Amino acid sequence: MARRRRKKSTRRRDTSVKLLNVAEAYAYSNIMTTNLFGASVPEFITGKQNISQPGSTYNLGAWASGETTDAAIEKSLGVGSVSIRDLARNPQLALDATAVRLKANMWNIVGQTVATRWGFKFGKRLLRQPINMINRSVFKPLAMGIKL
């Protein structure tokens, strides 16, 4: 009689939400919205629509002066922070302001993204044991589907 084959044990995929991954994603999105739109993530989502208010100017020629600060952007474009409402209301002006900010802050974005990546990578590695202890002693007994 032939031997029976053993079935491979089925492995379940870990479906829990990891809070450190959520924090890392928020940090990346905050870097992008701050440098591109001049607003943090909550301000970008819930911010007031201020692009097409009366008195705002649209003068990219003034940007050619060479200043690359947010005050210079606001002065040359008449645009403060850009929100989702601004993108919906006046997309051309909002995207022009975003392009100017991208040109001005490109290297800031790269540096902050690299620093954030390294910080989370080495922070997770250094704090591996305390993170595992918290996951075992706090989150696993609660069975909430959340890990640190």
Image: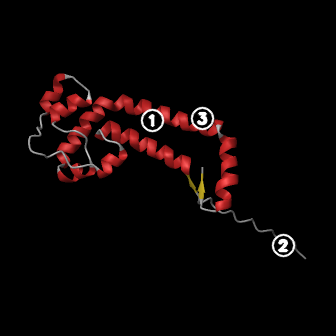
List the single residue furthest toward the top.
66
In this rendering, position of residue 124 left or right of residue 66:
right
In the image, what residue type sits under mark 2? Arg
Left or right of 92 in this view: 7:
right
Question: Is label 2 in contact with label 3 (beta carbons under 8 Å)?
Answer: no
Question: Residue 36's spot in the image, x, y percent?
Answer: 31, 38
Residue 113, which numbered label?
1
Mark 2 → mark 1, Cα distance in angstroms:
54 Å
Q: Is residue 140 left or right of residue 88?
A: right
Q: In this view, does 4 lie to the left or right of 134?
A: right
Give the secondary structure at mark 3.
Answer: helix
* Pointer 1 or 3: first along the chain: 1
Mark 2 vs 1: CB contact within 8 A: no
Mark 1, Cα crowd under 10 Å, few <14 / some 14-19 / many 20+, is: some
Q: Hey, which quadrant is residue 104 in on the image?
A: top left
SS at mark 2?
loop
Q: In this view, does 132 lie above or below 111?
A: below
- Residue 14 drawn at (x, y percent): 62, 58
Q: Residue at x 68, y 60 (%)?
A: 141
Residue 110, position as x, y percentages in the image: 41, 32
Which-is-in-front pick, marks 2 and 1?
1
**Above or below 57: residue 134:** below
Q: Mark 2 points at which residue?
A: 4
Residue that carries the numbered disc 3 in the rendered image? 122
User: Going 67% across and 41% down the picture, which residue do you hit?
Assistant: 128
Mark closer to the chain start, 2 or 1 = 2
Amino acid type, mark 1: Thr
| Scheme by which the image is coloured | secondary structure
Q: What residue type is labelled 3?
A: Phe
